[in-house]
Image (cartoon, rainbow, N blue to C red):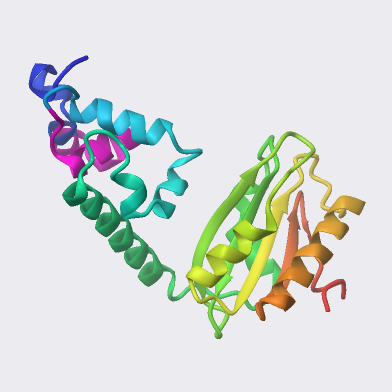
């Protein structure tokens, strides 16, 4: 185990940020900067590693409450508050940046999500919208295998409720390049649509991304 003072100065998170820019830091190093210091028995890097390695992906960090965070050795109330405040500030900055992104057509969504067009695994994404169809937040729900994706409808709706979203557009890619919906795609879309109706949230569309795209909305498959 190495403490920060034992790490060469050029390799310390703060110094690396100053010299190379924030983009060059790992998630662990970024968290270590927020935490500032470790304990008598653990370096801030070790504390950061334990937290990052304990969650499924970095996106899950935003779902940890202060009560959750203080369960980790080396994270007390003050550090937990700083983490939660940093995440909320980032969320607000992102929401402000997204304020001018809106979707009028399925093609708008396809162009916005074109980065997923040539992925070798299926990615399931949810776009959370306000009453003007402006983007509040984009969330990667799940990454599946080459030809199969699993997700929990609750995860989609929980985020919509947290964001006070009135509409959702879901999307996923087909690594084959063929956007034609499978029987499972149709079944899942109907299931999500039914769940949205119960929560009084509108499922606006489901876009399948391939060489082109398929829109459930444009094809009258969402009612």
At 54% across and 71% down in the image, what residue appears?
161
- The answer to whether 117 appears left or right of 46 in the picture is right
Seen from the viewer's position, the closer of residues 194 and 71 is: 71
Q: Of residues 96 and 158, which is closer to you in this image?
A: 158
Residue drawn at (69%, 35%), measured in percent from left and top? 120
Residues 34 and 47: in front is 47
- Res. 160 image quadrant: bottom right
Q: Position of residue 143 (x, y in %)?
A: 64, 41
Q: State the image coordinates of residue 167 (x, y, percent, origin top left).
A: 62, 76
Q: Total of numbered circles in the picture?
A: 0
- What residue do we see at 72% from left, 34% from top? 145
In this orientation, does residue 7 appear? Answer: yes
Q: Is residue 93 above or below residue 143?
A: below
Viewed as shown, does residue 57 lie left or right of 158? left
Please say whether residue 26 is visible from this viewpoint.
no
Q: Is residue 168 left or right of residue 24?
A: right
| Residue 33 falls inside the magenta stretch | yes
> Magenta segment, which residues?
17-39
From the top left corner, tell me how far across and down residue 2 is, in percent. 18, 16
Main secondary structure along the magenta-highlighted residues: helix
Is 147 a magenta residue?
A: no
Image quarter (top left, top right, bottom left or bottom right) of the C terminus: bottom right
Horizontally, is 10 left or right of 215 in the view?
left
């Amino acid at each position: 185990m190495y403490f920060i003072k034992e790490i060469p100065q050029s390799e310390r998170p703060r110094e690396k940020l100053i010299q190379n820019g924030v983009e060059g830091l790992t998630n662990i190093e970024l968290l270590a900067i927020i935490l500032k210091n470790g304990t008598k028995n653990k370096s801030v890097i070790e504390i950061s590693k334990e937290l990052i390695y304990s969650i499924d992906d970095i996106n899950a960090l935003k779902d940890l409450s202060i009560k959750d965070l203080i369960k980790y050795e080396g994270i007390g109330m003050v550090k937990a508050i700083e983490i939660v405040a940093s995440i909320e500030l980032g969320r607000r900055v992102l929401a402000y940046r997204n304020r001018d992104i809106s979707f009028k057509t399925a093609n708008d969504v396809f162009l916005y999500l074109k980065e997923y067009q040539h992925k070798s695994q299926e990615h399931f994404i949810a776009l959370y919208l306000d009453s003007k169809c402006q983007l509040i937040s984009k969330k990667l729900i799940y990454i599946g295998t080459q030809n199969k994706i699993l997700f929990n409808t609750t995860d989609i709706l929980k985020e919509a409720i947290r964001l006070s979203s009135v509409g959702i557009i879901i999307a996923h890619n087909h690594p084959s390049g063929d956007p034609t919906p499978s029987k499972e795609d149709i079944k899942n879309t109907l299931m999500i649509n039914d769940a949205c109706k119960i929560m009084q949230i509108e499922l606006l569309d489901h876009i399948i991304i391939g060489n082109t795209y398929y829109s459930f909305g444009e094809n009258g498959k969402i009612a």
